[in-house]
Amino acid sequence: MTPEDTGEPVESGSPDRKGSIRERILATAVELFGELGYTETTMERIAVEAQVARATVFNHFPQKELLLGEVARSLHTSFGDLLRKDTDPALPLRNRILDAQERWSLAYARDVDAALPLVRAWVYAGGPLLAVPDSTAEVLTEMIAEAQDDGSLPRAGSPASLGQAMNDALTGAMIRWTKQEEPTAESLRDVMLAAVHAIKLE
């Protein structure tokens, strides 16, 4: 009988052991979220399919929303990371956002069938309203502050409020994408680029 069968914690204290358990839980959650949807996937089912104790799942992820967020982050590159690391700082702010959006849409295009259930689950779970740090809003805030400091963007509002407003517009576009009858990578790109173009960045 394994520790998972008895319900005892499975972690041995080894980082590799802990890492493999966490990765197994995440991989199982990805499969179940895609197969059953967010609502029908329970932490108990994840534990059974991952062959770990229920308590082990909760040790790593106290709430299902946290597990969903981790799954999404593990599968897709953060838009905030693309803005910070992979755009030319010499470009105007709008061009940097458009460039990051193009790259980000391509990341989703690699596996729309896997991405769509996760985005829908995130929305259903209240992801846009969860009080968690948002790297995209933070990076947008930093970029707006820099643009205001160098004079390329007027000081029409605080960087924090403008950054959050831009992030909200992009999030809203993604939510609209999930509600399309047949969402595709191309339609995601279209709605996100339309949101960027609608934002006043002069």
Image: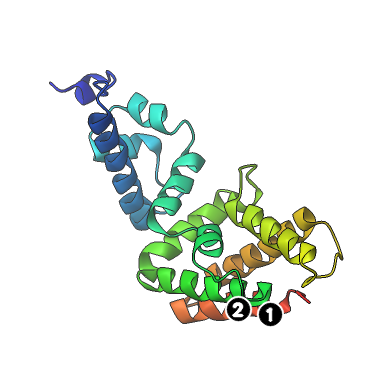
Quadrant (top left, top right, bottom left, bottom right) of the N terminus: top left
**Residue 93 appears anywhere in the view:** yes
**Residue 184 appears anywhere in the view:** no
Residue visible at 30% across and 48% down?
27
Residue visible at 24% across and 25% down?
14
Residue visible at 29% across and 20% down?
9
Residue hosting label 2: 193
Q: Secondary structure at mark 2?
A: helix
Q: How many marks?
A: 2
Quadrant (top left, top right, bottom left, bottom right) of the C terminus: bottom right
Left or right of residue 30, residue 144 in this image: right
Three-letter code for the amino acid on which mark 2 is drawn: Leu
Residue visible at 44% across and 57% down?
118
Left or right of residue 30, residue 72 in this image: right
Residue 197: mark: 1
- How far across and how far down the image is residue 53, in percent? 29, 27
- The answer to whether the residues at label 1 and label 2 have Cβ atoms under 8 Å apart is yes
Left or right of residue 198, residue 63 in this image: left
Residue 185: mark: none
Q: Secondary structure at mark 1?
A: helix
Compare residues 118 and 155 and report the one nearer the observer: 155
Outermost residue to the right: 156
- How far across and how far down the image is residue 115, in percent? 42, 63
| Local crowd size for mark 2, using a 10 Å CA cut-off: few (<14), some (14–19), many (≥20) | some
